[in-house]
Amino acid sequence: MVQGRQDKVYEYLIAYLKAHGFVPSIREIGEALGLRSTSTVHYHLTGLAARGLIQWEGGKNRAIRVLARHDDVPDDAAEAGALLGPGCLPVLGSIAAGAPIDAIALSDEVLNLPQLFADPDLFVLKIKGQSMIGDHIDDGDWAVIKRQNVARDGDIVVALLEDGDVTLKRIYREADGVIRLQPSNTAMAPLYVRQVVIQGKFVGLIRRESF
């Protein structure tokens, strides 16, 4: 009986993985299978781990690997161990947080991020410089950017300048059509421009030391 219930948990993990590309949370498993107690879900996951079907760090909500191969699991997911999380975001290049630099260059790097960032409009830029240090965005950090071409005054944006350079700054629209790109570093002066193309909005930060 217990093994049968474990099998249902395992089958749900497989089905969810196939549909979403990552496995569900403890709460989602319980809700889907009518298990009211998270300790019951923990019990079944422990059993599956003992049977060699999954690898699970007990007590951690999204730290399950599906280990056994299964016809319904995509080959790439099975070979990767089907880590909880949506996969990777592309690192498109570097972004200036000081003086503007050359336009974004393509990169082959990727960052594997948690489900929080599972959005096709997100990408990652590596920060160079300290012009945004007042917002705790430091040299070497990774900025998570949402791809969009509009922003409100005060938003931190990826701004493409007329000369093709890009920079990360807070945007403000001044009188007479002037746009102020404001650093958050009192040692640095703002940039005043007439035209700018917004390429994205800053939505999150990954500290370099976390890797």
Image (cartoon, rainbow, N blue to C red):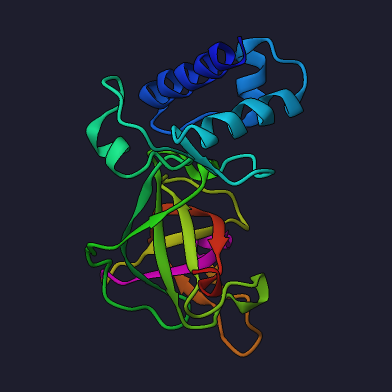
Is residue 179 located in the magenta-colored stretch of the structure?
A: yes
Task: Give the quarter of the image for residue 9.
Answer: top right
Task: Give the quarter of the image for residue 75.
Answer: top left
Q: Nearer the viewer, residue 84 or 152?
A: 84
Q: Is 105 placed left or right of 110 in the picture?
A: left
Is residue 130 located in the magenta-colored stretch of the structure?
A: no
Q: Nearer the viewer, residue 197 or 12?
A: 12
Q: Is 177 placed left or right of 108 in the picture?
A: right
Task: Identify which residue is drawn at 63% across, 75% down.
Answer: 184
Question: Is residue 171 visible to us here?
Answer: no
Q: Up-down: is 134 above or below 47?
A: below
Task: Give the quarter of the image for residue 210.
Answer: bottom right
Q: Is 47 placed left or right of 80 in the picture?
A: right
Instruction: Point out residue 78 in the picture as x, y percentages from the top left corner.
Output: 31, 36
Instruction: Point out residue 63 in the picture as x, y percentages from the top left corner.
Output: 55, 44
Instruction: Point out residue 151 in the picture as x, y percentages from the top left corner.
Output: 52, 48
Task: Identify which residue is drawn at 43% across, 43% down.
Answer: 83
Instruction: Point out residue 137 in the picture as x, y percentages from the top left corner.
Output: 58, 72
Q: Quadrant of the N terminus?
A: top right
Task: Identify which residue is drawn at 65% across, 44% down.
Answer: 60
Task: Identify which residue is drawn at 66% across, 19% down.
Answer: 30
For the record, the magenta segment spans 164-180
Q: Nearer the viewer, residue 52 or 31?
A: 52
Question: Is residue 54 visible to us here?
Answer: yes
